[in-house]
Amino acid sequence: MEQAITLTRHILEGQKAHPGATGEFSALLTQIALAGKRISFELSRAGLLGKTGLTGGTNIHGEAVKELDQISNDIFVDCFEYLDLVSMVVSEEMDTAASLKGKSKTGKYSLYIDPMDGSSNIEINESLGSIFSIQKNTNGAETEKDLLHKGSDQLTAGYLMYGPCTMLVIAYNNQVHGFTLDMGLGEFILTHPNIRIPSRGKIISLNAGNASKWDKGLQNYLKYTQEQTEKEKLFSYRYSGTFVSDFHRILLKGGTFLYPGEVKKPEGKLRLLYEVAPLGFVCEAAGGKASTGKERVLDIQPTEIHQHVPVIIGSAENVDEILTYLSH
Ligand code: AHM
Ligand code: MG
């Protein structure tokens, strides 16, 4: 353990390597880590304290809000409220962007979060996640329109994964690093430095129950993977229903995660600003690809904060292969 690189040490060393650094980036990452520790703690007791149920409310997407959706959202807001660095927060659990400019008007950054990803898995004690993205406010951030930045402009993005261990995966400067929470020390330890996604992989992660509603080309791709699997075991299907966990498996093992649009609902289910763009940023920084089927995820100019987009994300060769199947 003596040689362990904690997140704090990693951040401070990064700061030293950039003499002009203001310490702001370090402060932002420290608060993300704090939010992750607090949510992880809440999750570890939720089953015992009977906090796995619904609040009775519905979010902007028409989904029933779980108690832990609300708790995690409040934790993120609380961790950034007093910092004076983040001026606006966009969250899956808040209908409109929240302004954190109560104390001063200096917030230079905006935060985008899916505070509890995979919340339908809460009551079965399945792996869950939180997704985050931070953008620099180029022209101030007064209105929701000012928050509609392309994914390629993200300063940093990543996720927390609450599995058997809690992990923090962060992408910035074209690098991806993974940290594992040591519960005893209360510190994230660098366990996965410089993650690179395999250029090709066997895993396919999708909800096959929706296949009859997809584009014909994608149905043909699914058929092809089934035939190949029968013949040569070229593919293997894995799906947990938590985007973070399904993506994490792809990041480490290679393959593709898909949540396509349907012919009658082409925009798909997942949200651009706080689900698809952040994980797209992580994937590209690790050497992979993220596409909607029509364009690179990070090139999309958002038109509204809760926008949905289809996604095909993972190993570059797998994503390219899927794109050749799609009808345009
Ligand atoms: P959530 O953020 O409200 O939990 O919803 C997003 C989740 C993703 O984590 C997951 O990939 C997807 O919804 C699963 O959807 P489905 O049950 O339709 O397969
Ligand atoms: Mg989600």
Image (cartoon, grey):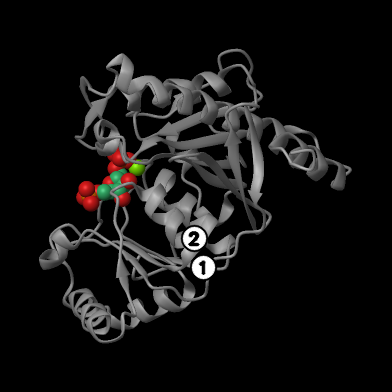
Residue drawn where x is 34% and y is 30% of the image: 93
Asked whether disc 1 touches disc 2, contact meaning CB atoms under 8 Å apart, the reply is yes
In the displayed image of the protein, which residue is found farthest to the bottom?
A: 231
Residue 161 x, y percent position in the rendering: 46, 41
Question: Disc 1 marks which residue?
Answer: 288
Image quarter of the C terminus: bottom left
Is residue 108 visible in the rendered image? The answer is no
Residue 70 x, y percent position in the rendering: 35, 23
Amino acid type at mark 2? Leu
Residue drawn where x is 34% and y is 80% of the image: 234
Which numbered disc, 1 or 2, marks the residue that appears first in the sequence? Answer: 2
Query: Is residue 85 depicted above or below 149 in this figure?
Result: above
Ligand 2 quadrant assignment = top left
Image quarter of the N terminus: top right
Does any atom of ligand 1 lie closer than 8 Å to the CB of label 2? no
Circle 1 residues within 10 Å: few <14, some 14–19, many ≥20? many
Residue drawn where x is 43% and y is 35% of the image: 144
1 or 2: mark nearer the eye: 2
**Quadrant position of residue 54:** top left
> How much space separates mark 1 and mark 2, taking CA atoms?
8 Å
In the displayed image of the protein, which residue is found farthest to the left?
A: 212
Amino acid type at mark 1? Gly
Circle 2 residues within 10 Å: few <14, some 14–19, many ≥20? many
Is residue 64 visible in the rendered image? The answer is yes
Query: Left or right of 176: which side holds 238?
Result: left
Query: Left or right of 100: which side holds 188?
Result: right
Question: Disc 2 marks which residue?
Answer: 251
